[in-house]
Amino acid sequence: MGSAFAVVRAIGTDRIGVVDDVSAVVEQASCNIEESKMSVLGGEFAVMMLVSGTDTAIRTLVEHDFSRGALKDFSVDVIPTKEPQAIRGGVPYEIETVSIDSPGIVHAVTSLLARERIGVEELETDTTPAPFTGSPLFTLRIRITLAGPKRAAQLKELLQQLALERDLDITVKRSSREAE
């Protein structure tokens, strides 16, 4: 009997113990955390995780009453999903942009990727004070998989054009993560 999968999404006011509370419910349902992303965003704590278990365990988690107990003040959804598919036949790359923060950076880069039919596997952003000036410095990191070096060279050229247009520092490098 194979595993079933679900995505758990939870968001609520940040407090100590949230991760413990979410992971306890997952364990009580006899599910396993496969992948997760958790972060404080403003004063909110956001959780995204992929869990696995038997059909019965996933159904138990889906039917869990989150309106009671430690997570009652959180908005929680459990969404059944299919087994993750490994990306095959490609080379993993990371794109990173660093610039003074301005609106539209994420859209400009992801729009270019969409036009080139390149899927975003993971995206992360961060804003920190720049050294010396304290101006907001925006960093965008994106993980993608490309068909090969020729495709990477084409993408690098397009991103460099975008970098000039938007005054961005963009790097594209082969990722250290293993391709399937």
Image: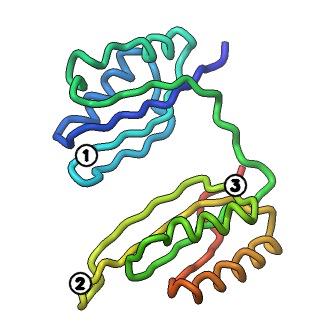
Task: Where is residue 5? Give x, y as percent.
Answer: 56, 25
Residue found at x 37% / y 66%:
126
Mark before the other along the chain sequence, 1 or 3: 1
Asked if the residue at tag 3 contacts the one at tag 1, i.e. Cβ–Cβ closer than 8 Å, the answer is: no
Residue marked by disc 3: 179
CA gap, disc 2 and disc 1: 25 Å
Task: Where is residue 158? Give x, y as percent.
Answer: 70, 79
Residue marked by disc 1: 44
Q: Amino acid at mark 3?
A: Ala
Label 3: few (<14), some or many (≥20) within 10 Å?
some
CA gap, disc 1 and disc 3: 34 Å
Task: Where is residue 61? Give x, y as percent.
Answer: 43, 16
Residue marked by disc 2: 134
Give the quadrant of residue 108.
bottom right
| Frontmost residue, 130 versus 73 | 73
Q: Amino acid at mark 2?
A: Gly
